[in-house]
Image (tube, rainbow, N blue to C red):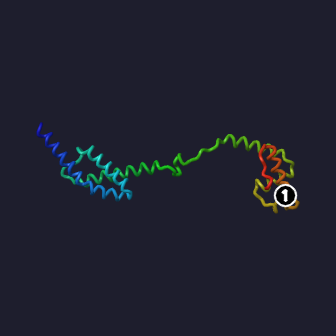
Amino acid sequence: MHDISQSTNRETTDLEAEIVDLIPALRAFARTFHRNSVDADDLVQETLTKALANIGQFDPGTRLKSWLFTIMRNTFCTKFRIAKRESPGTKKCVSGVGVEAPSQEWTIRAKELERACNQLPEPYRAVLEYVVIEGRSYDDAAERFDCAIGTVKSRINRARRHLAAQLDEDFDWRR
């Protein structure tokens, strides 16, 4: 029993020495995954940690270098998949989404605006709906309501002032 444990310890020590000899090859292989030498060294270190922790799973008679390269490749692929899944700023990532205002406030504001529009005198409301809401031109509105373009602009301006007063909003008079 004592001889078996000594030979196992000797084999493990020999494997560890071979692993140390393969560190330059591991660094070179890691550089194929990472251009940054710090990231490549981190990959080598993680590979060595996994290899030493699982040295008992190495099959004697197989190539140690291939076993280590497989550990490194699998480690890189796992980290890459995790980083891809958790990368910030992607479309599906929650951290990239800004805070959205609650919709209740907009619903209340829309109802207030509708009430204020219903209180507008008919000529103002009709021109405002036609130009602002439907997106028609001043020329089309002048033709439809049989008035001058200046009259259309005046009615829209008065409608905006009336709505601003009803909604307690500041109105930019330069428009």
Residue 42 placement (x, y as % from top left) = 35, 50
Q: Quadrant of residue 25?
A: bottom left
Left or right, 126 with reference to 42: right
- Which residue is at the front of the view, 106 or 134? 106
Q: Position of residue 34 (x, y in %)?
A: 37, 57
Instruction: Report how many numbered discs are placed on residues in the image.
Output: 1
Q: Where is residue 101 shown, x and y percent of the image?
A: 64, 43
102 with respect to 120 (left or right): left
Work out which residue is located at the far top of the displayed protein and give it. Answer: 1
The amino acid marked with disc number 1 is Val
Task: Name the quarter where the N terminus is drawn.
Answer: top left
Q: Which residue is mark 1?
A: 152
Relative to 123, 25 lies left or right: left
Q: Residue at x 82, y 49 (%)?
A: 161
In the image: residue 38, left or right of residue 154? left
Point 37% across, 53% down: residue: 38
Residue 150 x, y percent position in the rendering: 86, 60
Q: Residue at x 87, y 61 (%)?
A: 148
**Closest to the observer, 141 or 55:** 55
Pointer 1 local density, CA inside 10 Å: few below 14, some 14–19, many at least 20: many
Question: Residue at position x 77%, y 45% from top?
Answer: 169
The quarter of the picture where the C terminus appears is bottom right
Q: Is residue 33 above or below residue 113?
A: below
In what element is the residue under mark 1? helix
- Is 131 placed above or below 111 here? below
Q: Residue lying at the far front in this picture: please name it.
A: 38
Residue 132: image quadrant is bottom right
